[in-house]
């Protein structure tokens, strides 16, 4: 059981010419393995800043991130051990895989870096990782990213994140760049993997519908402040904060229909 | 539904036990090396490389190819026009011009190669580091690059070279490299800065890849085309620099190259009558410049396919039976269904 505590985290960016930008203002939450939290908010609300701080690509201006009660070491082996526990799936599968390297390279590197398996078993592990994300290992392993479809790439990115056997996974809008028709498949895969390995998932999104469907808890971020949090259904069905309400009203309602199709077709041409 | 097919397509294979024997073997390092030369696989680059290869063969086998010793003096035949004895005529001392050109290729290519390698090494080192780092470290490296960018190269080389009685080839190359690395570093810095923020580099960092591996394994392979083009550019500059220096007499005559030939021709009043003395050397310089430029154009096209000339595209379209001037989009004519309001028909001129 791993618990990550994000306590009183504030992040300021210095913007040339216009002083400082407060990206995160005293944000608190904790994530335990097996749990899924959805982090919802519009662009610029600080969602990705939380992801960057969690992966230690950036450091918080103040506040603490505790993994099982211990602060993250700033460098060296301790930082690597933290990173082995907390992995991230990036938003854009077209950008998050190195165009020059094969899928084999992408999956081998984390295995070798964290000494997950003995050297002679690395290849077997790569195969089983690809199988876990429902890709055919033999035909995928020596391809380059550009030879795969968006959905396949995101599966590879998920396999890469799982390679180090983390206990917590940050998924930064993992399906927003994918074709609508394959989004559900990737999300279901994530949900399955979470159940299999009892992962704690921070699901960052701006899509309330999938947030409700896939997470136990929803946290709404607005201008760097957590304005509302609670069990998914409560937040969606009974929003307390006006921003949440606005978000909910902004998402299309399947019960309301647009005006007749013939009418819209004629106006378009 | 597409998800289902996506997932189920792979599933049947999962049920079979994977046999290690049936696994594809990883690409060998030779295949990968060959793949990284893809940027030279176009007509322009190949043409340039062929010319370069001919020059290289001439330089390596100079003693076998040259009909005479380049400095062998034949006082019986001075300033002779081309003949069967001396294919490109002779100098005022009776030396064979063709042999001098052939041996001169060695000096030109050696200096070009050494200076190119040195300058590219410095450019990669400083450019990529400056691009990857941020803050004052990056700024100071960038300032250093700018200083070398505005340094007047030729005067500096003249000053340095004139400090020595007999500067070695290595020294000349080093001085040319010192004045020539800055452009490459500048371009590489810009490209590295844009690569640094790409997700795959961030992902490597988040995985805990050490800095040296991020730079050498994740970033450098994506910069090969720019490094190659920077190398070709510095070789061109080095060749031109060397011949210029030799022509104005800064480089001692013991270093035989095309510039030295021009120097002697000029010193001894070869212009304009004794054309065989200076025209071949000038043509060789031009030809080498063209070859290097062709290679660079090829790399440019590889990096940015849009640069491929419009003429080529038009030719390709004509082959397919299309006219380059007509619209590319095929317009499908749809009958407007009668009965509906007439506004949906696009054929109405009123719009």
Image: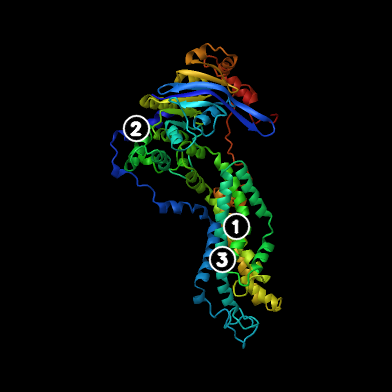
**Front label number (3 vs 1):** 3
Q: How is the image coloured?
A: rainbow
Marks 3 and 1 close (CB-CB < 8 Å)? no
How many angstroms separate mark 3 from mark 2 (CA)? 62 Å
Mark 2–mark 1 Cα distance, whole angstroms, equals: 52 Å
Q: Which residue is mark 2?
A: B11
Look at the image and tell me in which quarter the N terminus of chain B lies: top left
How many numbered discs?
A: 3
Nearest-to-viewer mark from 2 and 1: 1
Residue at disc 3, secondary structure: helix
Residue drawn where x is 39% and y is 35% of the image: A163
At x 51% / y 48%, what residue is drawn? B220
- The quadrant in which residue B255 appears is bottom right
Q: Is residue A200 above or below residue A113?
A: above
Q: Secondary structure at mark 1?
A: helix
Mark 3 or 2, which is nearer the eye? 3
Q: Estimate the x, y position of residue A42 in percent, counting from the top left.
A: 58, 24
Mark 2 element type: helix
* 2 or 1: tag closer to the N-terminus: 2
The chain that hosts pointer 2 is B
Is residue A57 in view from this perspective?
A: yes
The answer to the question of whether label 3 and label 2 lie on touching residues, with beta carbons closer than 8 A, is no
Q: Which mark is residue B233?
A: 1
The chain to which mark 3 is attached is B
Specify which label sits upstream in the sequence, 3 or 2: 2
| Residue at which label 3 appears | B170
Question: Which chain does tag 1 point to?
Answer: B
């Amino acid at each position: 059981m791993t618990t990550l505590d994000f306590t009183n985290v504030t992040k300021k960016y210095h913007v040339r010419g216009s002083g400082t930008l407060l990206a995160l203002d005293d944000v608190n939450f904790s994530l335990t393995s097996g749990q899924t939290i959805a982090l919802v908010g519009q662009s610029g609300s600080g969602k990705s800043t939380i992801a960057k701080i969690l992966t230690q690509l950036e450091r918080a201006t103040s506040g603490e991130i505790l993994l099982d009660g211990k602060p993250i070491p700033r460098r060296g082996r301790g930082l690597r051990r933290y990173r082995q526990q907390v992995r991230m799936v990036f938003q854009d599968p077209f950008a998050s895989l190195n165009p020059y390297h094969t899928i084999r390279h992408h999956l081998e590197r984390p295995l070798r870096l964290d000494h997950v398996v003995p050297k002679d078993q690395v290849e077997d592990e790569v195969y089983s990782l690809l199988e876990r994300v429902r890709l055919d290992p033999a035909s995928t392993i020596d391809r380059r990213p550009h030879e795969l479809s968006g959905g396949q790439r995101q599966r590879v990115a998920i396999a890469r994140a799982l390679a180090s056997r983390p206990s917590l996974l940050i998924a930064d809008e993992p399906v927003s760049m994918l074709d609508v028709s394959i989004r559900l498949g990737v999300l279901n895969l994530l949900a399955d993997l979470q159940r299999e390995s009892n992962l704690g998932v921070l699901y960052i999104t701006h899509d309330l519908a999938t947030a409700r469907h896939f997470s136990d808890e929803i946290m709404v971020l607005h201008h760097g402040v957590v304005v509302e949090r609670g069990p998914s259904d409560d937040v969606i069905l009974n929003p307390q904060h006006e921003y949440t309400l606005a978000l909910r009203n902004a998402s299309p309602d399947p019960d309301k229909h647009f005006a007749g199709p013939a009418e819209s077709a004629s106006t378009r041409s | 539904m597409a998800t289902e097919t996506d997932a189920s397509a792979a599933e049947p294979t999962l049920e079979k036990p994977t046999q290690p024997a049936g696994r594809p073997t990883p690409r060998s390092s030779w295949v990968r090396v060959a793949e990284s030369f893809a940027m030279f696989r176009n007509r322009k680059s190949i043409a340039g490389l062929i010319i370069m290869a001919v020059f290289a063969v001439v330089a390596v086998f100079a003693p076998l190819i040259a009909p005479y010793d380049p400095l062998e003096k034949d006082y019986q035949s001075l300033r002779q026009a081309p003949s069967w004895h001396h294919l490109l005529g002779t100098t005022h001392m009776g030396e064979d011009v063709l042999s001098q050109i052939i041996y001169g290729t060695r000096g030109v290519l050696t200096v070009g190669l050494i200076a190119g390698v040195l300058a590219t090494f410095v450019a990669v080192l400083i450019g990529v580091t400056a691009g990857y780092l941020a803050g004052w470290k990056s700024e100071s490296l960038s300032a250093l690059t700018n200083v070398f960018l505005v340094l007047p190269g030729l005067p500096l080389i003249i000053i340095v070279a004139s400090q020595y009685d007999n500067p070695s080839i290595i020294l000349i190359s080093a001085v040319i490299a010192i004045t020539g690395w800055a452009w490459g570093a500048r371009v590489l810095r810009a490209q590295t800065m844009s690569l640094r923020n790409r997700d795959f580099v961030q992902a490597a960092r988040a995985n805990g890849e050490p800095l040296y591996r991020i730079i050498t394994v994740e970033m450098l392979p994506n910069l090969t085309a720019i490094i190659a083009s920077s190398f070709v550019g510095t070789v061109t500059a080095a060749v031109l620099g060397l011949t210029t220096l030799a022509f104005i007499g800064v480089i001692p005559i013991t270093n035989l190259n095309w510039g030295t030939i021009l120097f002697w021709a000029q010193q001894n009043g070869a212009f304009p009558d004794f054309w065989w003395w200076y025209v071949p050397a000038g043509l060789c310089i031009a030809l080498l410049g063209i070859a290097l430029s062709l290679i660079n154009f090829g790399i440019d096209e590889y990096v940015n396919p849009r640069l491929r000339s419009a003429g080529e595209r038009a030719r390709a379209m004509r082959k397919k039976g299309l006219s380059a001037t007509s619209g590319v989009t095929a317009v499908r004519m749809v009958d407007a269904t009668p009965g509906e309001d007439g506004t949906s028909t696009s054929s109405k001129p009123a719009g």
